[in-house]
Image: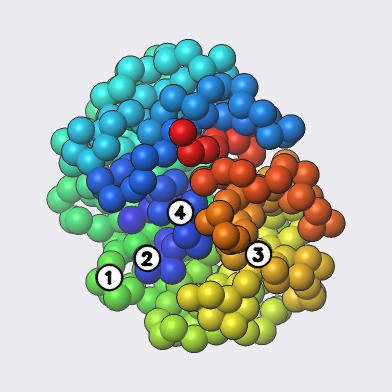
């Protein structure tokens, strides 16, 4: 599987609902969400009307209606107008003018008019970054990379591959369910040998990594040469964004989340029940109380600027964030 530049298998990028729902469409077990888009005051500017929704990119956002095998994805613009009809089983956002979409278990790419842009089909596909996108080829059943015309620019030799970020990407050796993870550059050269249970995309010069596949606190951070710069001591760790990274302490079951700087020091204490990365100055965090689990948004001082009131809240992008409140 490909996850916006991060291949984490069991240890997906974000704890709780954010990572699960952002990666794939509903499997029929997701509660009855009602998604719209909020601004930075926490008010809905696109009213809740979707069963799932992803952040905006390049002025368009994927939205879903229906559940289970009956769900379909389309795309809206910033007015909330449907500009590409509901017809896809799975999607990822538009980057460099193209978006991966899946119909009948095969992936391809469309342009912003909804036209098929690459005359090929794949077992999996993710977004373009600087003219390269990872895809799983139907013949080899391995991942390689293509250009926007669909030409292979890196051989399909990987059991796992991610989008490039900061000119580096994740690759996997072994079976997809039990792979060891390392890092390659755009030439396909190995930068970090495949020896980790998982790694995140490089952001701001650092990658979060997990040493073992056991449920132990061994997430840390390495630089672009594979040198460990923040010792592995966290139960979970997300990529750096805007100078901070969300990390979980103690354990993955009920450990709290906070934010560290690049020296590994907490600048926002671990007091949240779940957390996402900072985006456009705000980060979605979850707190639990007698009313259940609710998401709000904090600033870099750790202060709530949008009080917890959403049952799901995603990253801000282009000034808007998908969020859901109970009916």
In whole angstroms, how far apart are the C-alphas of marks 1 and 3?
30 Å
Q: Residue at x 49, y 27 (%)?
A: 48
Dividing the picture into quadrants, the one containing residue 313 is: top right
Residue at the spot of label 3: 272
**Residue 117 seen by the camera:** no
Task: Name the secondary structure under disc 3.
Answer: strand
On the image, the x and y values in percent for residue 59 come to 57, 23
87 sits left or right of 258 in the view: left
* Camera-side mark, 2 or 4: 4
**Quarter of the figure with the N terminus:** bottom left
Q: Is 85 situated above or below 273?
A: above
> Is mark 1 in CB contact (under 8 Å) with mark 2?
yes
In whole angstroms, how far apart are the C-alphas of marks 3 and 2?
24 Å
* Camera-side mark, 3 or 2: 3
Residue at the spot of label 1: 177
Q: Sequence-wise, which precedes: disc 1 or disc 2?
A: 2
Q: Sequence-wise, which precedes: disc 4 or disc 3?
A: 4
Q: Residue at x 49, y 86 (%)?
A: 216
Residue at the spot of label 4: 17
Q: Is 297 situated above or below 150?
A: below
In whole angstroms, how far apart are the C-alphas of marks 1 and 4?
21 Å
Q: Residue at x 33, y 28 (%)?
A: 65
* Residue 9's disc number: 2
Q: Sequence-wise, which precedes: disc 2 or disc 4?
A: 2
- Classed neighbour count for the residue bearing mark 3: other residues with Cα under 10 Å, few (<14), some (14–19), many (≥20): some
231 sits left or right of 23 in the view: right
The furthest residue to the front: 290
- Classed neighbour count for the residue bearing mark 4: other residues with Cα under 10 Å, few (<14), some (14–19), many (≥20): some
């Amino acid at each position: 599987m490909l996850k916006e530049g991060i291949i984490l298998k069991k240890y997906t990028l974000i704890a709780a609902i954010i990572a699960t729902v952002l990666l794939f469409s509903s499997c029929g077990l997701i509660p009855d969400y009602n998604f719209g888009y909020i601004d930075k005051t926490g008010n809905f500017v696109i009213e809740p009307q979707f069963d799932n929704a992803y952040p905006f990119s390049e002025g368009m956002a994927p939205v879903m209606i229906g559940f289970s095998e009956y769900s379909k994805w389309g795309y809206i613009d910033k007015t909330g107008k449907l500009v590409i009809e509901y017809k896809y089983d799975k999607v990822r956002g538009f980057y460099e003018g193209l978006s991966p979409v899946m119909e009948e278990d095969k992936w391809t790419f469309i342009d912003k008019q909804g036209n098929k842009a690459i005359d090929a089909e794949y077992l999996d596909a993710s977004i373009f970054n600087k003219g390269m996108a990872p895809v799983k080829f139907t013949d080899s059943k391995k991942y390689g990379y293509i250009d926007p015309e669909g030409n292979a620019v890196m051989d399909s030799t990987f059991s796992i591959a991610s989008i490039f970020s900061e000119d580096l990407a994740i690759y996997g050796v072994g079976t997809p369910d039990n792979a060891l993870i390392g890092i390659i550059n755009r030439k396909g050269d190995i930068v970090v040998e495949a020896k980790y249970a998982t790694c995140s995309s490089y952001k701001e010069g650092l990658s979060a990594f997990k040493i073992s596949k056991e449920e132990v606190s061994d997430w840390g951070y390495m630089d672009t040469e594979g040198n460990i710069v923040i010792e592995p001591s966290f139960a979970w760790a997300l990529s750096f964004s805007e100078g901070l990274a969300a990390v979980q302490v103690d354990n993955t079951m009920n450990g709290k989340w906070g934010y560290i700087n690049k020296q590994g020091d907490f600048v926002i204490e671990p007091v949240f029940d779940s957390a996402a990365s900072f985006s456009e100055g705000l980060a979605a965090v979850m707190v639990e109380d007698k009313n259940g689990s609710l998401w709000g948004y904090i600033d870099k001082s750790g202060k709530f600027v949008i009080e917890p009131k959403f049952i799901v809240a995603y990253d801000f992008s282009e000034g808007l964030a998908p969020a859901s409140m109970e009916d």
